[in-house]
Image: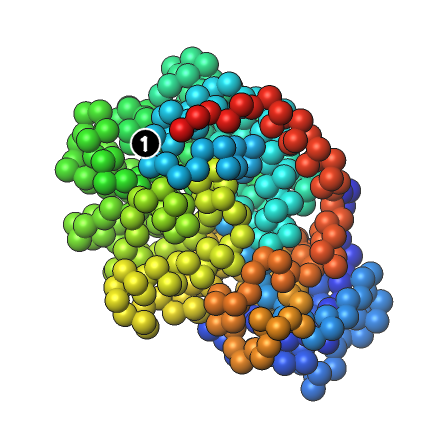
Amino acid sequence: MPDTMPDSIFIHNCTLITAPGTTLLQRAWLLTKGNVIAAIGSADSLPPPETTTATTIIDGRGGLLAPGLINAHNHCAMTLFRGMADDLGLATWLTRHIFPAEARHVNEEMVYHCSKLAAAEMMLSGTTTVADGYFFEGQAAQAFVETGMRAIAAHGIIDFPAPGVPNPTQNIETAVRFLDTWQGRHPRITPAIFAHSPYTCSNQTLQQAKELATKRQVPFFIHVAESRQEQGMIQAPQGTSPIRHLAALGLLDPGTICIHGVWLDDEDLDLLAGNGAGVVVCPQSHLKLASGMAPVSAMIERGIKVGLGTDGCASNNSLDMFREMDILSKTQKIHTLTATSLPAAQALTCATINNASLLGLGNIAQLEPDYKADLILLDMHQPHLTPCYNQDLLVYAASGADVQSVIIDGRLVMRDKKILSFDVQATMEEVHRLAQKINAPQK
């Protein structure tokens, strides 16, 4: 896709959701100019004159126009490992299957093509922004540029020989080079740092990685408190829980994004709230790996900002954020045995506004003038979406398959379920070729 400044798009004859919890705007229209939303209105208000000269005019055909979803945690290149090692506990899955597969098969070519495949899956299911964390992350960032995705691309740091960093003593230096290459390079790409976990990174590495992220003013991601056994896996623990360990190392602040947060007690929750660190939960991955249920309702009650992600599709196995919102809301209801816990509007907030705030993305995730034009149009002419009384339907009934068209940064990247920004079939063929080299390990 040529990365030139987009012109303007006029979408009419649709219902519009400006933000979670708001009333649906019926018989609406929306105009983009460049990469931002220029104006919105209903049939009762006349659209501005420039709509008649818009570069692209889209008849919404009664569809639902909504903010694009944000996937706040993914390992995009792991599309290659989808279905390779299912129905296993976290420790077995990770140490006996995923780490060995990564050592054998992860290279620049794999990360590039498999990240493009993930971008296709996310676009087709209504995700317009992803926070990715992996190795050879420069190749992932390039894939996101070419596909048209908006992305936070986080370079992975781990204290073991890793793809692209065979000598772990060079892990911080490699991350510095990644930031030097990508910081300020492309307006849709935000580089970041991803320290894998407190049990795969030494205390010194964790502190150096956080210091680098703070110095360069980029997000700092870390897997933490995912399993009940995690505390016992940490070398030289500085606290009595993984969160207290991070706090003792001085890693918790508003620039830190804790991934998973399943096993948190009251003291952990108070530390997160007091230090302003956010949490991204991945409920389907937690369920599939039998990790547990994150106490999201308790986090929200304490004012902790909670975001939502899919995790990599080797542990999900889908990148559909509609499924993730549905599972998030329902698991919290069963976790608390309270039907009013985490209502649909809150789940949608986690997948849009909260994620944008956690990731430091500014004016996206709402359909308002001067916000970035990241939009999705859903086909509502479906039995399972009839009737539509309010936006709760997006969480409890809709799926990624209902997404008709996608606009990212003012560019039409998908129309009538066809991706326009790159050749998806060619990407699938490349990933099939890479998959032929893998013999799925026996459980």
Amino acid carrying label 1: it is Ala
Neighbor class of circle 1 (other Cα within 10 Å; few <14, some 14-19, many 20+) is some
Total marks in image: 1
**Residue at the farthest bottom position:** 44
**For this view, does 33 lie left or right of residue 397?**
right
**For this view, does 69 lie left or right of residue 263?**
right
Q: Is residue 203 above or below residue 283?
A: above
Say which element carries label 1: helix
Residue 335 visible in the current orientation: yes
Residue 395: x and y in percent read 49, 65
Q: Is residue 9 above or below residue 391?
A: above
Residue 96: x and y in percent read 38, 25
Residue 185 visible in the current orientation: no
**Residue at the farthest front position:** 442
Q: Residue at coordinates 67% horizontally, 77% vertically from top-left?
A: 28
Residue ID for mark 1: 91
Closest to the observer, 44 or 329: 329
Q: Residue at coordinates 60% horizontally, 34% vertically from top-left?
A: 114
